[in-house]
Amino acid sequence: ITQGGDRWQYTNYSQPYRLMSIVFKGNNGFIAGDRGVILKTEDNGSTWREVNPAIYSYVLNDIFFPTATVGYAVGSNGMMLKTTDAGETWTQIGDGVTNHTLWSVYFVSATRGYVVGERGTILVTTDGGATWDVRFANTYATLKDVYFTDLNTGYVVGHWGVILKTTDAGASW
């Protein structure tokens, strides 16, 4: 907790997991990390509880909520999860799309989203994760983050100094 970034209060979760990503929608916040753990707060981070228990063999590297109720998490071995009930329950989506580690997820709406990862992986969905299209980025670098400034213009960054840009909603990079 900060006051203009000058002071921070240390809060430790009682389990020794690596926590990889955090996102907030209003007072609700989510953290993703080791063994598939997803933590949720409903009081601006004063307390956290597990909504996806840490019993899995994968790491969740990123988590994103395009709306207050719909969220996505991505991680190792091509793992992609989705919630439609504000993070209370999570289901696997995109089974078999890739087995590469996924590092970042970003949605420009509740249905159109992008995922990036190892070996130049770029995945695009236009139906809320029901189906995924693989896009070729002309690189085998690990892609670490994706961000869109509007519905059509997006950026991806990765290892080896890779910076990719799209101006056609991810059809080409």
Image (cartoon, grey):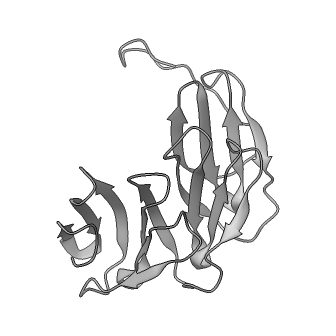
Residue visible at 49% across and 52% down in the picture: 110
Q: Is residue 129 positioned above or below 101 on the image?
A: above
Q: Is residue 56 positioned above or below 142 on the image?
A: above
Residue visible at 49% across and 59% down in the picture: 111
In this view of the protein, which residue sits in the foreground, 44 or 97?
Answer: 97
Which image quarter: residue 165? bottom left
The quarter in which the C terminus is drawn is: bottom left
Q: Residue furthest top?
A: 3
Q: Position of residue 89 (x, y in %)?
A: 77, 51
Question: How many numbered marks appear?
Answer: 0
Residue visible at 20% across and 70% down in the picture: 164
In this view of the protein, which residue sits in the foreground, 137 or 17?
Answer: 137
Q: Position of residue 81 (x, y in %)?
A: 65, 63
Which image quarter: residue 116? bottom left
In this rendering, position of residue 45 left or right of residue 7? right
In this rendering, position of residue 112 left or right of residue 68? left
Residue visible at 56% across and 64% down in the picture: 74
In this rendering, position of residue 157 left or right of residue 85? left
In this rendering, position of residue 110 left or right of residue 51? left
Q: Position of residue 84 (x, y in %)?
A: 67, 50
Q: Is residue 146 positioned above or below 150 on the image?
A: below
